[in-house]
Amino acid sequence: MAQNVNPLYEPQNTNSGKEGEMVKLPQNDGHAVTKRLHKELMSLMMSADQSISAFPDGENLFSWVGTVWGPKDSVYEELKFKLSFQFPNSYPYKAPVVKFVTPCFHPNVDTQGNICLDILKDNWSALYDVRTILLSIQALLDEPNVDSPLNGLAAETWTKKDEYRQHVMAMYKEV
């Protein structure tokens, strides 16, 4: 026998004790995500800030390549870092996966380029955008959280600037 079924709802056994209660499923609105990413791209292109940039990687709007220049007066000054962005279908409600492509010796970056940054994890907000992420990563380069390191050696040597800079330059390879 045919039933009228709303595709946005699914019968669930919930803790409320009502078997067959209908629970709303999250929508996957690719158009809204695409529109948001286009808006962010235009904003970045119009920005006067030359120390950060990001663009889609080819035709895939959900995969971007970003660049961050090391902050002035830091051990990273004049170094350019390439980053990869992978946006989920639920963006901006879920943070993109952002990684360093350029090898980076830093207390909050591991050898695979993973970044320990609160706004990319627990403190993500749909109000953040690609520009916010890039500026946060740029700030993180000069102000690491050495109390929560992904790279123990980098955290240990952070206060020894000459030794630290030697590690940075030994690992750095522009890609």
Image (cartoon, grey):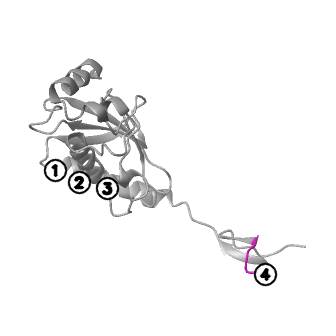
Q: CA distance from mark 4 to mark 2?
A: 48 Å
Q: Position of residue 121 (x, y in %)?
A: 43, 53
Circles 3 and 1: CB atoms closer than 8 Å: no
Secondary element under disc 4, as helix, strand or loop, is loop
Residue 106 seen in the figure: no
Q: CA distance from mark 2 to mark 3?
A: 10 Å
The residue that mark 3 highlights is 129
Mark 4 or 2, nearer chain start: 4
Secondary element under disc 3, as helix, strand or loop, is loop
Task: Find residue 50 and report its image quarter.
Answer: top left
Residue at position x 68%, y 68% in the image: 7
Q: Nearer the viewer, mark 3 or mark 4?
A: 4
Circles 2 and 3: CB atoms closer than 8 Å: yes
In the depicted structure, whether residue 63 falls above or below residue 163:
below
In the depicted structure, whether residue 108 falls above or below residue 18:
above
Task: Find residue 64 and report its image quarter.
Answer: top left
Circles 4 and 2: CB atoms closer than 8 Å: no
Pick out the residue farthest to the right: 1
Q: Which amino acid type is marked by label 3?
A: Asp
Circles 4 and 1: CB atoms closer than 8 Å: no
Residue at position x 30%, y 31% in the image: 154
Residue at position x 38%, y 44% in the image: 116
Q: Say whether residue 159 is left or right of residue 101.
A: left
Q: CA distance from mark 3 to mark 4?
A: 40 Å
The residue that mark 2 highlights is 43
Span colored in magenta: 12-18
Task: Identify the disc placed on residue 18.
Answer: 4
Q: CA distance from mark 4 to mark 1?
A: 53 Å
Task: Identify the disc placed on residue 47.
Answer: 1
Circles 2 and 1: CB atoms closer than 8 Å: yes
Label 2: how many Cα within 10 Å (few below 14, some 14–19, many 20+): few
Mark 3 or 1, nearer chain start: 1
